Amino acid sequence: MPTPDVSVVIPVYNTLPYLRTCLDSLLRQTIGHDRMEIVAVDDGSTDGSGRLLDRFAARHPGTVTVLHQANSGGPAAPCNRGLEVATGRYVFFLGSDDHLGPEALERLVAAADRYGSDVVLGKVVGVNGRHVFSDVFAAGNAVDVSLFDSALPWSLANTKLFRRDLVDRLGLRFPEYMPVLSDQPFTLAACYHARRISVLADYDYYHAVRRLDARNITYHSRVDQRLVSVERLFAFVAGLIPAGPRRDAVLRRHVGLELANLVGDDFRRLDRPAQERVHAAVRRLVERYVTDGLRDRLDIEARLRLGAVTAGGVDDLLAVIDQDAERGVPATVVAHGRWHAGYPGAPAAWTDVTEVRADWLARLDTVTVSWADAHTLAVTTRSPYPRFAAEAGPVRLVAGPLAGTTLLDATDPTGRTVRTDFPVDRLLAGSAASGQRHPVRAELDGGHGQGSAPVRAPRLAAGRPRLVRQGARLYGVAATVDPRNGQLVLSVVPVTVGQLVSRLRRRWRGGAASERSGVGLVEGHGNLEEGGAAQVEPGAVGGADQAHHHTGAGRAAPDQAGGVRVDVQPGHRAGGAAVVAAAHGGTQVDREELAHRPVEHVAVQVGHVGHALSSGGQPVGPNRSVRTRRVGWPSPTSRSATVSTKPVGPQT
């Protein structure tokens, strides 16, 4: 059998809702089955992922190889085992909840062969609003990219094409002693020793999916694992790259991201012993690895947090975090011609912002977020600096790549308040069909030069997204707060069938309250953001956009709990998949990926009454029809439900 051009290694653990899409994307690759092999390693899954892998292997012998092992606690061990059996000239690592564009492997292999590249990175796009670092793709295709003078250190996931000769020559393997971040040493070593690294930005190669069903492991529960892994990562970098500007160029990412995140806003939620452990570990790493030159290249917030760590104890660090998270941007202290950020507890060397005054002036606090009208989201921000209007110059707020329309707020005579309008249609147009998060930044260009900074949103309450339609699909648009750093984010997230059913199930558990209120099926759908992310209450965003849902709830019989059955039939074909939600139970999904599909042409039945999900009186989408039927239970107190899966009833 000829050697395949590329082996795709997939570590799999409990990703059943996404795994079929992942595997289908590989089997549809234009490179062809004869030039690729798929090596999937089931790391002790308990949700049926292993059985699905076996079915694919049986249908595609010679292309799909499946290995099963006991759970190892992380992706390193299954990646290593996959490497042991992979035979391709190149190896590519794919997350089992992610997927590839159809031409991805063919394009990647062709580029590696054409340019003689040892590592090729294809453009990564986020799905369901997942954040990805995209700066490395901003300049377009690049045949030869340096690890030390590019944005590559911010894109060190192992989701790249690696030449197998390089992997074998260096003996590269994933460190199984690192519970998290284990892909970083592998990728760093490969990029450091590579003859050539190429970046392809001309196609959506890798689709990184934010798992809508994930029960995210919190910062609190994994903080000790992260501490161990971060310390080992820094030691690895120090052993790989000699001290000097090149090491600093790589460590800038690890200090500004992994290390700074350890003392992010979530630090306040740890118990005191955990706070002491984190503080001690971060202080050791800063004192050992952060040079003056590296310190001066850090973002202001990371510099101030880490400065507080080196200057004092836990309480000093908490004072700095509380200032950002609760009170907002502090005053500017000007003395002897130098500017300092007025944080308590941080040393002068770390608070001196004289050389980055423009960036400091760009630090604004969110005052309000509101719907200016049905189609415009307005963000009002304010600077604490008294001479902001005179020294900042032109100011604008951008949400991801989208620049809003920014004007001075006429109600503030000091000129320190600005309002920025973001048209919703432009937010939707600037988002992938699978959703997108748009972090909000302030940019200015005045007497102190050009500056930019994330816009924080302290003290803003949680709210719910507004549902809007883009073409045939429904999306939730909301202003949210990133729990890691407090940054304001405008999110566009597709509404899926699973979310709709989940919302209905929660509503029925509350009894007849929804019937009395007359609230529609889609109104109040608030479970669209990443786990743990607070949602800003932006005025009218807290309520539903009445033009985009059908109001009117059915009345269930006194002796029955309401229920729903949704039969989705792609292309009006018979025998589609089904989602069943019960008032006293969970959600049954006949075909695992259905619950994560976007809501398009949907009709559901609550109790005895059917409801068509519509927008402006028109069907939400023509691509799928849904058959609905009432599902009843023997009694409201019963904990079980008997549901027939035989399709019956009229098509709507």
Image (cartoon, rainbow, N blue to C red):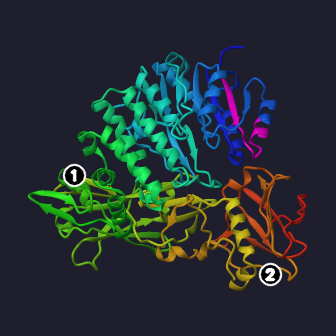
Res. 41 visible in picture: yes
Residue mark closest to the camera, 2 vs 1:
1
Q: Quadrant of the C terminus?
A: bottom right
Q: Earlier in the sequence, mark 2 or mark 1?
A: 1
Q: Amino acid at mark 1?
A: Val
Numbered label tally = 2
Q: Which mark is residue 240?
A: none
Res. 426 visible in picture: no
Residue that appears at 25% across and 45% down: 296
Q: In this view of the protein, which residue sits in the foreground, 162 or 469?
A: 162
Q: In the rendered view, would you say 63 is above or below 558?
A: above
Q: CA distance from mark 2 to mark 1?
A: 62 Å
Query: Residue 509, position in %: x, y?
Result: 74, 74
Query: Furthest-front residue in view?
Result: 273
Residue that appears at 63% across and 29% down: 8
Q: Amino acid at mark 2?
A: Arg
Query: Residue 377, position in %: x, y?
Result: 45, 69
Provide the residue designation for mark 1: 356
Q: Count residues near mark 1 (Cα–Cα under 10 Å), then give few for <14, some for 14-19, many for 20+.
A: some
Provide the residue designation for mark 2: 555
Left-right relation of 301 to 615: left
Magenta region, residue range: 36-53
SS state under label 2: loop
Q: In this view of the protein, which residue sits in the foreground, 478 or 529?
A: 529
